[in-house]
Amino acid sequence: MNEEEFGFETQAIRNQIERTQYLEHSVPLYLTSSFVFEDAEDMRASFAEEKDRNIYSRYSNPNTNEFVNKICKMEGAEAGYAFASGMAAVYSTLGALLNSGDHIVSAGSVFGATHSLFMKYFPKWNIETSYFDINKPETIESFIKPNTKILFAESPTNPAIDIIDLELLGDIAKKHNLILIIDNCFATPYIQQPIKWGAHLVVHSATKLIDGQGRVLGGVTVGDVDLIKEIYLFSRLTGPSLSPFNAWVLSKSLETLAVRVEKHCENALKVAEFLESHPNVNQVKYPFLKSHAQCKIAKKQMSLGGNIVAFEIKGGLEAGRAFLDKIKLCSLSPNLGDTRTIVTHPASTTHSKLSVEERLAVSITDGLVRVSVGLETVKDVIADLKQALA
């Protein structure tokens, strides 16, 4: 069989670096800071980038190379680079491509740390960001200026689980000659491949579902080879590279991504259906529920609904805090995508520094709860949520 004809799971498991002379079955760890050269000419040619080889683990390493290659195949990307965390991926990707005076058009619903980059730090370098309402996609083009360079979005969004039409974003980016960057963390490449819809770059926090067990930090950006070269050169100098050990863990994690995500999504849909029927819940947002405003778009670009469910508890801020205090089985944690179900109340924790108006602008109500549904027996998760809602 041609390697390109292999299925997702086969690619995730069998796409490995070459075996050493020891013929190991599982890829070994390459815990080395640097690599040696055969002679002076080999060293010169390597540093001149006339040879594609490992020089220093801040640049590349066999373990990070394997991890990146797997993600590239899963996303349909030409090239990629791996980072120490998801935010290192976001910052380095944008930092490599933006110049002073450039402008970003972004969905208003973005991860809190990404929002801080846009609003607190990029203005120091004369880089401006304009936010569009993800529920009003018809307004996106009105935010584009002559100096706009990047169109940025997450889908599904964190934490409100809104969906943006990736095909629409791809068409807008093409029309206005913009670089479209999609944070695909919540969906993973198993559920959604933004490059198919016109994205130039795809960013992941590998810390989440890609690792899937709350063990290591990691990030990755994949996409157009020319853009990745700019990101590589920037990152080679600034040093946010992924450690070989974490890359090894994440590459092994990808071998089980498909089976884990299938079960996550199966459990999440059952949790969403339970919550939708509960009298103390105002609203439930899960991409594959018929009640989700963008369900049709979600089913066009996603193969499954993901593992994140957002719901609004009746009673607002105090009801949300009381709910967390009653939780017994599930974990209270800022992470997500773990084997263990995690619940978070954004208004009193992760987004508590935003004003009420700022939170409502991105669909974060006082009673909103985010549930990262894990791999436990789903009836046990539902029982815990039920008693906490009582």
Image (cartoon, rainbow, N blue to C red):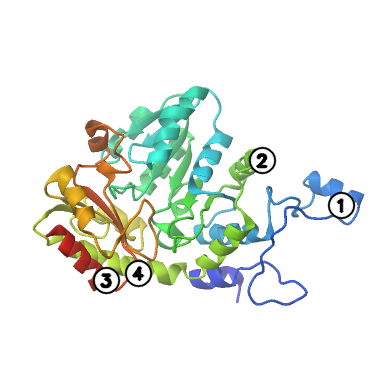
Sequence-first tag of 4 and 1: 1
Q: Is residue 44 above or below residue 148?
A: below
Disc 1 secondary structure class: helix
- Residue 384 lies, in percent from the top left, at 21, 65
- Residue 287 lies, in percent from the top left, at 27, 56
Q: How far separated are the C-alphas under marks 2 and 1?
A: 21 Å
Task: Select label 4 or label 1 by which is in front.
Answer: 4
Can you identify the residue that label 2 sits on?
Answer: 233
Q: Residue furthest left?
A: 279
Q: Amino acid at mark 1?
A: Asp
Task: Select label 1 or label 3 by which is in front.
Answer: 3
Q: Amino acid at mark 3?
A: Val
Can you identify the residue that label 3 sits on?
Answer: 378
Sequence-first tag of 2 and 1: 1
Q: Is the C-beta separation of discs 3 and 4 under 8 Å? A: no
Q: Nearer the viewer, residue 8 or 221?
A: 221
Q: Amino acid at mark 2?
A: Leu
Q: Nearer the viewer, residue 122 or 200?
A: 122
Which of the labelled discs sits on residue 42, or is there none?
Answer: 1
In-image side of 37 versus 108 (left or right): right
In-image side of 230 versus 40 (left or right): left
Q: Amino acid at mark 4?
A: Leu
Can you identify the residue that label 4 sits on?
Answer: 375
Disc 2 secondary structure class: helix
